[in-house]
Image (spheres, rainbow, N blue to C red):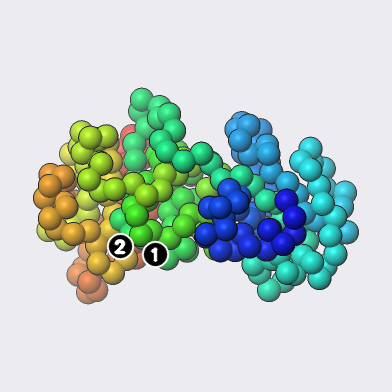
Amino acid sequence: MKLDDVKKLHQKKYRQSLGHFLVEGEHLVLELEKAAAANPHWQQAQLFVTSAYQDWPSTWTRHLIGDRQMAQLSDTRTPQGILAVAPLPPAGNTASPADEKAVYLHEVQDPGNLGTILRTLAWFGGFRCLLSPGSVDPWNPKVVRSSMGAIFHVAVETEVSLDTLASRYSRTACLDIGGEPLTSPDFQNHDCYLFGNEARGVPAEALNRLGAGRFTIPGAGAIESLNLASAVNMAMYELNRVKVR
């Protein structure tokens, strides 16, 4: 890929039209290489390095560039000198293991929240991430960076309409201030766990149509709500705490 095209990958419209995204920094490149060992899709990545990383061991096509060129490609103030350009995953559903569950995020906006959630899903395993229309692009450099490479290890679907969940999952759960405690045994008995936008949540009529089970994280009530990523983290921990008990 030409350098002029690589520069454009900071924008979503060019990531979509060119079919690639940026992976910047030593740790993220290592995580991508780790994922490529198990997933041939990631083996098509290309590497761009400065002289500081010219001896980096890799089977990928390598491009040696100058520090000034790297600064133009980088999304950070102090580039490390290594980045990869990786192909976007194929659009549409990927095969799901029989015991896999889903986390559905409705119009999540904050790249840091999404990155943190992906780290949680990668840590526990057994979940795919479904993103509604209007959500932040998961291949945004800020999401990729905040995920610390977890995005390469989690199945991610974009543009998934709320209206399609009922046909895919028999039981959907959501968090609601008036719901049953998260520790309720019934919390385990769902296929899809739905979380709303950071400010607006999920439209009540959509939850009613889904017949979503409602659960809450008990607290002192001194503030109105939890951070979205914190809520997902607690829910995933509870699901796995019971599973391994």
Instruction: Indicate the position of residue 158 as horizontal and vertical percent values.
Output: 41, 48
Circle 2 is placed at which residue position? Answer: 197
Q: Quadrant of residue 189?
A: top left
Whether residue 51 is visible, yes or no, is: yes
Determine the CA span between mark 1 and mark 2.
Answer: 7 Å
Which amino acid is tagged 1? Gln
Which amino acid is tagged 2? Asn
Q: Secondary structure at mark 2?
A: loop
Whether residue 237 is visible, yes or no, is: no
In this view of the protein, which residue sits in the foreground, 237 or 163? 163
Instruction: Indicate the position of residue 183 as horizontal and vertical percent values.
Output: 22, 46
Mark identifier at residue 142: none
| Residue in the image at 39% along x and 64% along y | 109
Q: Earlier in the sequence, mark 1 or mark 2?
A: 1
Position of 215 with respect to 5 (left or right) is left
Mark identifier at residue 109: 1
